[in-house]
Image: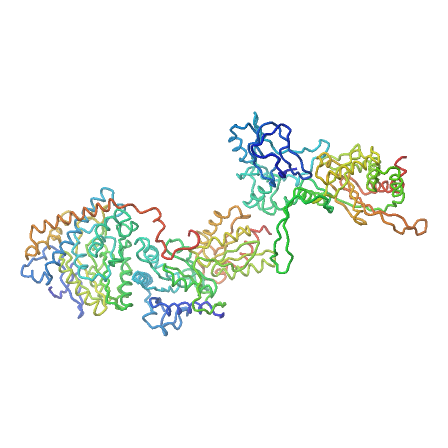
Amino acid sequence: MNKQSSDSGPRTGAKSRSATAVIEQEAPTTPEHTSRDSSDSEQNLQGLDRETLRDLYYQMLLIRRFEEKSAESYSMGKIGGFCHLYIGQEAVAVGTISAIRPDDYVLASYREHAHAIAKGISPEAVMAELYGKAGGCSRGKGGSMHMFDKDVNFLGGHAIVGGQIPLATGVAFASKYKGTDQVTLCFFGEAAVNQGAFHESLNMAQLWKLPCIYVCENNQYGMGTSLERAMSFQDISQKARAYEIAAEHVDGMDVLAVRAATERALERARKQSLPTLLEVHTYRFMGHSMSDPGKYRTRAEIEKYQERDPLKLFSATLNENGIVSENELAEMDEKVRDRVERAARFADESPEPASEELYTDVYASPISRGEI
Amino acid sequence: MEEGQLSRWLKKEGDSVAMGEPLAEIDTDKATMEMQALTSGVLRKILIKEGESAPLGQVIAIVGEADEDISELERKAQAPKTEAAPPASTQAPVEEQPSEPSTAAPPPSPQPPPAKPEVTTGGDGRQGDVVAAEASGRLIVSPLAARMAAEAGIDLRSLSGSGPGGRIIKRDIEDAITRGQEVTAPERAEAAQPRLRAVPPLQQPTIAGASPFRDEPISEIRKVIARRLVTSLGPVPHFFITTEIEMDRAVQMRRNINALDPDLKISINDIIVKVAAAALIQHPQVNASFQERVIRYYERADIGVAVAIEDGLITPVVRSADQKSLSEIARELRDLAERARARKLRPEEYTGAGFSISNLGMFGIDEFTAVINPPEGAIVAVGTVTPKPVVREDEIVVRQMMRATMSCDHRVIDGATGAKFLQTLKKILENPLYLVV
Amino acid sequence: MAVITMREALNQAIREELLRDDSVFLMGEEVAAYDGAYKVTKGLLEEFGDKRVIDTPITELGFAGLGVGAAMAGLRPIVEFMTFNFSILATDQIVNSAAKMLYMSGGQFKIPIVFRGPGGSAFQVSSQHSQALESWYAYFPGLKVVIPSTPADAKGLLKSAIRDDDPVIFIEQERMYGIKGEVPEDDDFTIPLGVAEIKREGTDATIVARSLMVPTALKAAEQLEQQGVSCEVIDPRTIRPLDIETIVKSVKKTNRVVIAEESHPFCGVAAEISAEINERAFDYLDAPVRRVSGEDVPMPYAKNLENLAIPGVEQIVEAVRDVAYLE
């Protein structure tokens, strides 16, 4: 990867302060900055083997098709409440989570279907949870915004913006307390950075040297409010540096770039027990949620970003490097669509939770007295 | 009388009954009455168990044809206090209501109706015994008091509440339970009959070292005594006059009369009744009773004589004692007392006296004050006849002395009036020949 | 039996649980080096070190959430709020994370955390530092709320709260840290949550009181005894889950009840208890349920006004006399 120092972060004009541990990278936020240099292809593949590379693509494709199916199911009324889709951001969830161990932890926001699947929750269990069925990973009691799976260390699924950030900090605290080298990944959008919880958490993470990687998925819009309208100083990585935390800008449309950045952060976390903030630049092609009329951005802007669709970019890369053929890509798509159909069928057939479930799991230590 | 207790069923469900046949024994506040079938048919349903009480008017059984549908009657019977018995061939016998004789004075209400306009009628929605009457105002009562009233069979409309806004509260129900319609004199009962109820279990005290105890349910008669006593000594303004009577000649007369005929067993008490009757005729202002708006003066002397029975006391009445001979009085009293102890008196035999006599002489009591049986105007309490030294014409002699205390209702009888009556009573007892003059 | 202060009892409870279970740790503002703002955590840093006794920055939302996250990952945090007034900043993590995690994860992630600290009034610390928030937290299914009034209760209940697998809001009282009481010396002395205690038996009226109002209610009961009214004083000790059965049993015996609290009346714990009594013991009430609550105003600074705002013995006596229909 390019190691560069630059004087200005994207769109901010702010001065950067480079500390010795900090790596900066120019963030390719406008299409003009992107260049596909085929001579970088070996470097771009990061020395990953064929299987891993194909699997990266498979994961992203699975998530893409899953989210498309969710949109369809939502329109049919099979999914209730809110449904926040991840389409366009697949490289972030897959690039980061593919680099961590099964015993590492992940916490995410409400836009979490991708992270849940990437961490290892079956599409069946995720879809059933979306449908509010007993076969869902949270037994139908969480829904789209509250997926959990203790076995794969996916710790939710949180619906208060920024609420997961102190939680993730605490999970990292626990690993350090127990003396393991487990790492916690915390995903949130750029709008969450304005919450006090973000600042309180980062302060403690650096103060107490906690092994937490804060992945800020900067998709430039907090619901309908653009970054410029919400944030006085828009270089989020700088905000991390204000807490002495190592930070990088990352091209979120490039799954390998995301993965590489994650590896660096993991090293820092495991070896030095220090946090990192990755400001990952990405874009969501769908609205904030299924109910978003999307009046705050132009069709043209969306289309511009769709030229850098992470699936398109990566399939091209794999193709060019002979990792996967067009046929194989088509086969993979068919397999993925089958898988997603199976998941939807599973969700359809899964029963609703029993009425008694209304009152289970309110308390872990049951109350012996009365009904309260 | 407000309620009765089902003492014993004489028939069971499914038995056929003929008109007039006794169905059950009902324990009223004075005696055990037989309830007779008012129709022929089959005893289809018994709605009240032995030992249970019911207020007047509540359906306690259903008699009908063997195959008749009685579900409607049953349903009505369970509903809150129903009206009169339904017509047609099926009949639901209601509680026998031993009616007061028309000559008897209606008993005073336990408390004067309250002046407050809001405490009149108005149901509070409770099922059971509280009557939901036509409402002209709201009855305000605490939930606890409502429940207690229902259980005790007390009509909330007859109470005024001592709580804020006229709220009827627990204390008011407790007070009402200890008041009643009729009062009999609080004299000690002598057990002549075997116990009618099972012995309750012995309970251990909560206070260390204290005595174990048994709690007996209060029988009907005790309830009535309790109720009535409280309406007497409290509301009725009593005053008491005492005199000492030389009974030598009366005692001698008794001996002489009894010597005439062994069947004549005249007692001192019989003589006192006869003399009191004579005195009452001579002092009509004493042969009277207070009736709220009038004072009632009686033509003849109906004298109630207190009789101790097992579990309480009762005052059978010797009617027109002024017109009866000593032997008639004696015979009547003997018969009344015997039937009183067997609890076989009819209501007209123990209500409606104008005056009462109570004698504790047989227990060695010198003197006592009795509580008036309302609505009577007075009662005389006599003690033992006992030889005592007295001064006669400046000499000390021994005479058979008996102390008599008269309790008078001051609303009816003034001091002088009462004193004059007592003077006459003394005069005739000391000289029984006055009876034939 | 030892006679110790409330703060000593709490200190012992925390210390014993830190010794007993390595996954228990304590954090909060000034809990370590300062020995605790109210000296409840005195000596603990020295004994257990800074891995287990942790001074936090002034960052309530952050450290409350950190505690909840640590609990998700298997630790048993004790999070101190210097006063519960400051817990308001942490409400999102207490209510949206801690209270709901087990439920919305379908039973996968329990949160065995204790949030503790003093609540209610102190001495002239004014409106932002004097709030009694137990009804606030008791509102949320998923939380447990405990509020002791004696050193023994404090120790036994805090140990149970720490061992409990659910988030417990443990509310102490600054005015009561110095009170003394007998505490069993058994190092495994616990009191179960959700069990009320009859602090004084009686027959004529029931007084339900918690925290600061317990000594006040007991004094009122003494006075009323002289006046011929025998009062039963019940301390629920746990607000959620509430031992309503003990309270109802007493009301069925006495037929009249007064509920005393220093918190505001509206939507308070006394209102909840009153509703429960209405539903479960309606036919046993000879008088309406009376509440004696703190005044419905922010706490004023002036000493005389503060005293007016907090119920005293006279108010409880008057209320009992009222429900007993005595002048």
Q: Would residue B379 be found to the left or right of residue A259 on screen?
A: right
Q: x%, y% of residue B229?
A: 70, 44
Q: Would residue B363 be found to the left or right of residue A220 on screen?
A: right
Q: x%, y% of residue A213?
A: 22, 63
Q: How is the image coloured?
A: rainbow
Which quadrant of the figure contains the C terminus of chain B?
top right
Q: Would residue C311 be found to the left or right of residue A345 on screen?
A: right
Residue B11 to residue A219: above or below:
above
Q: x%, y% of residue A165?
A: 27, 60
Residue C172 to residue C296: above or below:
below
Residue B321 to residue A211: above or below:
above
Q: Quadrant of residue B37?
A: top right
Q: x%, y% of residue B378?
A: 77, 41
Outermost residue to the left: A39
| Residue under the image location 55 percent in, 61 percent down | C219
Residue A282 to residue B230: above or below:
below
- Does any portion of residue C120 appear in the rendered image? no
Q: Quadrant of residue C51?
A: bottom left
Nearest the eye: A187 or B277: B277
Q: How many marks?
A: 0
Outermost residue to the bottom: C46
Nearest the eye: A297 or B188: B188
- Does any portion of residue B90 appear in the rendered image? yes
Outermost residue to the top: B88
Which quadrant of the figure contains the N terminus of chain B?
top right
